Image (spheres, grey):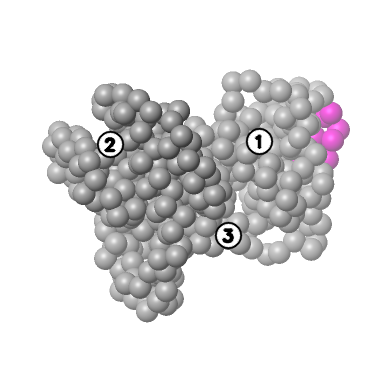
Amino acid sequence: MAVHQAEQSHLKSYVRLLVDLHRLVANNAPDSDEADDLRDQMDPHWYKLANVELRLASALGADLNWFDQGRDDQVQTEDLIIGLCLLSTADLDEAPETKRFRAALDERLSRLDRSKQARLKGLLQDLCSIGINRMEMPTGSGQAAKDFQTATKRHEWDLALTILREHESEISPAEVAAMRGVCWGQLGNHEVAAIFFGEAVRLNPTNIEVESCYLRSLIRCGRLDDARRTARFIVNKKAGVYREMLAADILFDCLMASSERKREEWEEIVSIVDRAAIDPTAAPGEPHLRQLVCSAYLGAAICCDHLGDLAKAEKIYNTAHLFCRSDSEAASRNVRQPAHNGDHSQFADAIQLERTALGAGQFPIASSLSMT
């Protein structure tokens, strides 16, 4: 498999420097001139890393700290796998740190049953594709696509991952990463899913469905600050009205998942939706985009209700249904009736139920492969 090695140069260089720095820290020389020089060398590489690579590099840094402090028990199995993958990427297979990681991982795996061992060993193989850009074009495999679709329909996610590994060279790298994200998410590992969705975004930054999956995975694994930061970056760079609607939808889900909800956060979401203001007659026909806009409008309606502007909440609610009409007239009546009665709590609750039924917060990407 042909690999564009230059694509990994910054990650590889950063990891090697990081290991050297931690060796100095372990030898009680964190403030030495040599340590400061290493930090200066690391900075240019750090700023060149993609989001997914930043996440992996940060995890490795934490893992090395835990080892240096003699707290191996705090290093989780998946963190060890991430660390091993990055050390291998940096050509440090024989380094003392790698041997320690490998020994700790082997000890942990020995306590698991065979199916879990196989799953985690597969994860190590999957993660080693991060940061690699394959040069060859996919050759396509109709049978592999059928097998994958059959596995996903049966919710056999480990089998689906195995099929991806066996036919990886036949599929576009961005699609492999996205489908790995779907599979790992379905297995309940949203932290790992976020890594692969992040890689898919790196490889295909124009795909809004993949970006949505990435941000929703961040929320599901509790990384609300990262999700908020990325959503606000989308808004600030004016990435287009549909991405702004995605940002508003993500910020709303973050707000719902937070214990503390500030007035300015409700106002921020309404402001973003107001600014995007998509014309329903000019909206594209893609169901996932219309669903996204509808969900963002429904969230903004709840925000308006919370802010005490019930008239605007109703107006935004009606706009939402110009993009994605409810299949149930009863659902719409359940929303509007409390509004007419001035019952704010039931109004917001009814909209949230409708938003959930719409599929808000779910992965929009289909669990299938084109392999073309």
What is the three-letter code of the residue carrying label 3? Pro
What is the three-letter code of the residue carrying label 2? Thr
Does residue 7 appear left or right of residue 142 in this picture? Answer: right
Q: Give the residue displayed 71% in from the left and 23% down from the top.
A: 262
Q: Give the residue displayed 79% in from the left and 54% down from the top.
A: 278
Q: Where does label 1 land, which residue?
A: 252
Q: Residues within 10 Å of mark 1 (few under 14, many from 20)?
A: many
Q: Where does label 2 land, which residue?
A: 77
Instruction: Give the SS element for disc 2.
Output: helix
Q: CA distance from mark 1 to mark 3?
A: 23 Å
Q: In the rendering, at what x and y percent does residue 65 appear? A: 36, 30
Q: Main secondary structure of the magenta part?
A: helix
Q: CA distance from mark 1 to mark 2?
A: 32 Å
**Dot label at residue 205:** 3
Query: Can residue 1 be seen?
Result: yes
State yes or no: residue 311 in magenta.
Answer: yes
Of label 2 and label 3, which has the lower sequence position? 2
Q: Give the residue displayed 53% in from the left and 56% down from the top.
A: 201
**Dot label at residue 177:** none
Query: Can residue 333 be seen?
Result: no
Residue 255 occupies quadrant: top right
Q: Magenta segment range?
A: 309-317
Q: In the rendering, at what x and y percent does residue 130 appear? A: 40, 55
Mark 1 vs mark 3, foreground winner is: 3
Q: How many marks?
A: 3
Of label 1 and label 2, which has the lower sequence position? 2
